Amino acid sequence: MTLNDQNTPQTKKSDTLSRIGGFLRERFSLDEDKQDEADVIESLRRGIDFRGINLWTLIFAIFIASIGLNVNSTAVIIGAMLISPLMGPIMGVGLGIGINDLTMIQQALKNLSIAVFISLLTSTIYFLISPLHIAQSELLARTSPTVWDAFIAFFGGLAGIVAGSRRDKITNVVPGVAIATALMPPICTAGYGLASGNLYYFAGAFYLFLINSVCISLATFLIVRFLGYHQKQYPTPEVERRVRNTIWVAVLIVVVPSSYLGYQIVRKTIFEQNAKRFITNEFKFDNRQLVSYTARYNRHQSTLELSLVGEPLVKDSINLLRAKMPPYGMDDAQLIVKQGNFKDAEIDVDALKNTVTDQVIKYSQSSIARKDHIIDSLRRYIDLTQSTHLSVADLRNELKTLMPDVQTFTAAQSLVMNRNSTRPDTVMLVYARFSRKHTKAERQRIEKWLQSRTKSKRIKLLVE
């Protein structure tokens, strides 16, 4: 056996891996349709400056976004994101770091600071003069940033710089990035925080804007380095080291707090889902109704609060509920049951109304069904009596021909109720008095004549 024969399997494996690697490089390559480096840099550089049309466009976009947040209109907020030119200086920072252009970094940071100041000033003025001061859901959603916002901004920034580096621009990417990364709403929410004096709203919203800005710049920096753009030399090694340290500090400021907030939100969501499953599966007591429940997550002591109406739960039943909580991941949660006295309880009025309404509807439907059944039975009886309406005088005259000794006669359809059924039945009730006593055969002849004459199979004949 030759040496080449021994290496044949290894050679085949190497060729297979090479083909797979070549296929993947071809599919994921960013060299195709790549725009000239100088053109990309010049295009991004033009978007950095905030003066003239860029500045006016920013102000108009801020007003639009603020109005959208104020009236809780998602469509208006999306429109403002598409108009906003804030992406320019943010991507400029990442580009400047990527190519070691200190002048571009300084210029981008200067213009970004101007844009942020103008944005905060514009949104604060709007919310100061606006007659609407209630924080709507769209505004509140921008006050609690998490690590998910960092991921969205980072991947959005990757998509934006990749699309911007193509010769044939991908027209739907940049608007999509503007919507996904959402730079306008946070800065407007920060303005609302300043106008209302709510520092919590201001800090949360401004931190979200900072997360988006840093992650977009980081994504731009990574793609520029990946594409191999020509890098300038920093004036001194100290400057280069200071820039790199600043980048890492900014990334840590964004990632660490947002990761912690994201982790807390995940735990809060899990606790609320477990509480809902626990109530659905375990709260099954007669003669009492759960009006509302509140699941409050706290990393030290979470609580599940139940508000009940009806017969009070005894202590043993409450302890049984507590014993069933650990399998639902609520080992350390405190169970609070409020019943009987709701003086200090926070009752969800809408939930109470819905509960009472449901009970009334169920009772009404059952009552209506019973009444409908009775009405249908009576309607059938009325129809039957109307269809078999008899002329008592005619029957008496005909019977007088058959039995001349008849003295008194009457006939009518009568309603008969059975003790074992709620459905009524009908019978032809006939009363007659004769001057003499009839034999059994004569009575049978009268009954057969009545059945034939009245077309009724059920006849009750009473004779005197």
Image (cartoon, rainbow, N blue to C red):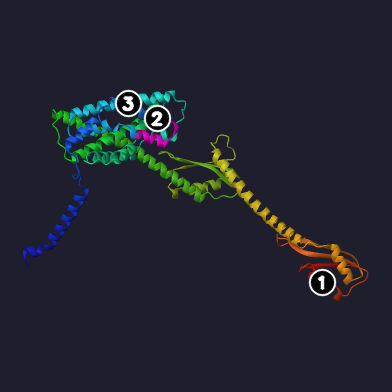
Is 194 positioned to the left or the right of 455 in the image?
left
In which quadrant of the rendered image does the C terminus lie?
bottom right
Give the number of the disc on residue 62: none
Tell me which secondary structure the magenta stretch mostly adopts.
helix
Q: Which residue is mark 2?
A: 66
Identity of the residue furthest to the left in this view: 2
Say what secondary structure mark 3 lies in: helix
Q: Which residue is mark 3?
A: 56
Vertical order, 149 against 370 (above or below)? above
Q: In the image shown, does 307 or 367 lie closer to the viewer?
A: 367
Q: Which residue is mark 1?
A: 449
Is 15 positioned to the left or the right of 391 in the image?
left
Is 427 positioned to the left or the right of 60 in the image?
right
Amino acid at circle 2: Ser
The disc, 3 or 1, on the residue closer to the chain's N-terminal end is 3
Amino acid at circle 1: Trp
- Where does residue 392 sit, x and y in percent of width and height? 84, 63
Is 269 positioned to the left or the right of 152 in the image?
right
Residue range in magenta is 70-81
- Where does residue 123 sit, x and y in percent of width and height? 38, 26
